[in-house]
Amino acid sequence: MSRRAAAACATLAVAAIAASARAATPPAARACPSASVVSAALEVKVKVPTSTTAGSAKSCSYSTGTLIPVKVGFRADTSATFAAGEKGAGKLIPLLVIHGLGASAWATKAPGELQVFDGHGTTITIQAPLVANVDLEALARKLL
């Protein structure tokens, strides 16, 4: 095996181990993303998060200097309940289905909220009013 092929295999193995570790972490035990990661992805300056945990869910709130904080949440979920939530939300507000992000994902047509089911029992919710959906997607990709 060439050095290049060996290096590629090693890189894939490390990525698989990291993904497996994230998948094995219960949603409420996940660390809040750092303010620098959130700020860079959303292009909004945020402060260090405060977090709350309730049962199998965790919410991370980031002050933005305005009245409306940015929020990132993690909760235990299944594909069936995620789909039911999407269907229910779609009856109230227009949604966009996001292809190629997690196992399933949707965002509000008016920028500000994105939900992604990772396929391993966790839904990630990002709420950032007036932030473009493409930026919400960028943050979600970093969290998967």
Image (cartoon, rainbow, N blue to C red):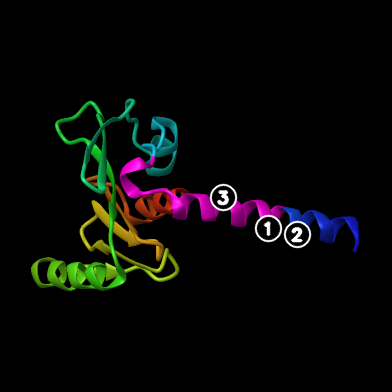
Name the residue at 47% across, 50% down: 22
Residue occupying image coordinates x 45% and y 53%: 24
Secondary structure at badge 1 equals helix
Comparing 11 with 107, the one in front is: 11
* Secondary element type, mark 3: helix
> Picture coordinates of residue 105 (x, y %)?
33, 65
Q: Residues within 10 Å of mark 1 (few under 14, many from 20)?
A: few
Question: Which stretch did the figure color magenta?
Answer: 11-30
Which x, y percent locates residue 95? 22, 68
- Which badge, 2 or 3, is on the more N-terminal residue? 2
Residue corresponding to mark 3: 18
Q: Is residue 52 magenta?
A: no
Tell me the quarter of the image containing the N terminus. Answer: bottom right
| Amino acid type indicated by mark 2 | Cys
Q: Nearer the viewer, residue 78 or 38?
A: 78
Which residue is disc 2 drawn over?
9
Mark 3–mark 1 contact, CB under 8 Å?
Answer: no
Principal secondary structure, stretch drawn in magenta: helix
- Which residue has dot 1 on it? 12
Spatial CA span between label 3 and label 1: 10 Å
Residue found at x 34% / y 26%: 48
Residue 19 at x, y = what percent?
A: 53, 54
| Number of numbered callouts drawn | 3
Earlier sequence position, callout 3 versus callout 1: 1
